[in-house]
Amino acid sequence: MADGYTITLAQTEPKTVTLAGKSEILNLVEYVEVSNVDVSRLKNDTIKNTTLKIPNGLIIVDGNDSVEVSLTIETIETMVIGVSTISFENLPANLKSQVEGTPIMVEISGAKSFLAEPGLSASVDLTGLTEGRHQLPLNIKTKAGVSTTSNHSIWVEITK
């Protein structure tokens, strides 16, 4: 991909093909791969023609091994989002925890359409900790296509 761009959707036409061959080979096939498509300089949606990689011992019933691959291309953008809900993992039942200084500002990047709903969740692991103030790594999870651009830590106060 060209720097600053990503593929957000790839679809083929036709979507399905009919294969023929010995059943023991057919039963192993879950999908058919397409040959490599050069996307190194793409910055806009495009349609590329390519061929299917038919597994050895199988044939395409209609004999046509070419497909069109439609690619949706978007720019990669970065934004800062506030995280105010943090889940605590492995906190002993007799203790309480509180984060200091929420919301935590997190920088995320991805295609603009993915950033609208980043699927962001944050947690901190309190395994083995006792009362006191602790600086801990913040575990941030996002949906596919979205990533955080740096590591974060937070201060957590653990009390009885």
Image: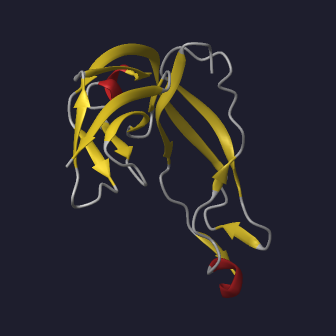
Q: Residue at x 26, y 25 (%)?
A: 116
| Residue depicted at 49% across the width and 26% down the height | 151
> In which quadrant of the rendered view does residue 67 lie?
top right
Q: Looking at this view, is 132 or 24 the one in front?
A: 132
Position above or below: 133 against 16? above
Q: Is residue 35 left or right of residue 148?
A: right
Residue at position x 59%, y 17% from top?
42
Nearest the eye: 125 or 64: 125
Image position, residue 55 (x, y; %)? 74, 65
Q: Is residue 101 above or below residue 130?
A: above
- 95 to the left or right of 54: left
> What is the residue that sits farthest to the right in this orientation?
56
Q: Nearer the viewer, residue 93 or 7?
A: 93
User: Is residue 22 in view?
Assistant: no
The residue positioned 36% from the left and 42% from the top of the image is 124
Whole-percent x, y for residue 37 in the image: 68, 34
The image quadrant where one finds the N terminus is: top right
Indicate the position of residue 68 as horizontal and vertical percent values: 56, 39
